[in-house]
Amino acid sequence: MSAKIRKNGGAEPDAFEASVAQELLNLEATSTELKGALRDLYITAAKEVDCGSSKAILLYVPFKLLKSYHKIQPKLVRELEKKFSGRTVIILAQRTILGKSYMRNKKTTGPIPRSRTLTKVHEAILDDLVYPTEIVGKRTRCKVDGTKVMKVLLESKDQANVEGRISTYASVYTKLTNKAVTFDFQ
């Protein structure tokens, strides 16, 4: 098992996860600019998502390592997209959603942490999805037939870099959260 993937409960990674972990290991060995930063980093899971015309690779990382990944994310994503040609690479934090019926143990009582609610986790997934770009605003549009569409406004200075990925972002977010979303620039 590769040192670049650590699954919960010690489960064995599947073939796709092993190939992604191997590419991370190769990048650590060959890339001079990423070598030091990738030494202590690993992933918890990898998934391939079909986005209609293209495919996306989702890398799940531990929440505690997300800041470290953000420091090298543009370089890392660029290198991984070269290796997996034609696929968009997205880095997401592994987050937990606690239901309303969540009971704490006997020693600690109180409400559930706000960061573990469904709404907050979905907002955090959206932030992770478009990471180098900042979200400027959000609007939820309720249509007459009862459907809701979230319109997300992104920073216009990154429009050139993100323009081609918008359809992939929308498709991945819909697959992960079952919420319709459209992206626009302000």
Image (spheres, grey):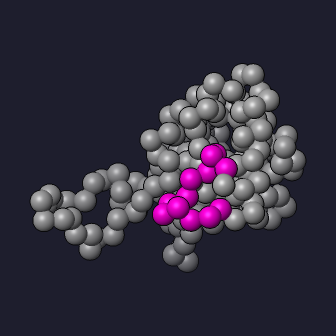
In the figure, residue 182 lies in which quadrant?
A: bottom right
Camera-side residue: 15 or 57?
15
How far from the left and from the top, in percent, is residue 57? 72, 54
- Furthest toward the top, the residue is 33
User: In the displayed image of the protein, which residue is found farthest to the front?
Assistant: 1
Q: Position of residue 165 (x, y in %)?
A: 75, 46
Task: Please state, as top left, top right, bottom left or bottom right, where the C terminus lies in the image.
Answer: top right
Q: Is residue 153 left or right of residue 108?
A: right
Front residue of 94/151: it is 94
In the rendered view, tell whether residue 155 sits above or below residue 147.
Answer: above
Q: Determine the image quadrant of residue 76.
A: top right
Give the residues in magenta: 2-13
- Position of 92 compared to 88: left or right? left
Q: Is residue 158 visible?
A: no
Looking at the image, which residue sits at the far bottom?
145
Where the N terminus falls, by quadrant? bottom right
| Residue in view at x 75 percent, y 31 percent | 29
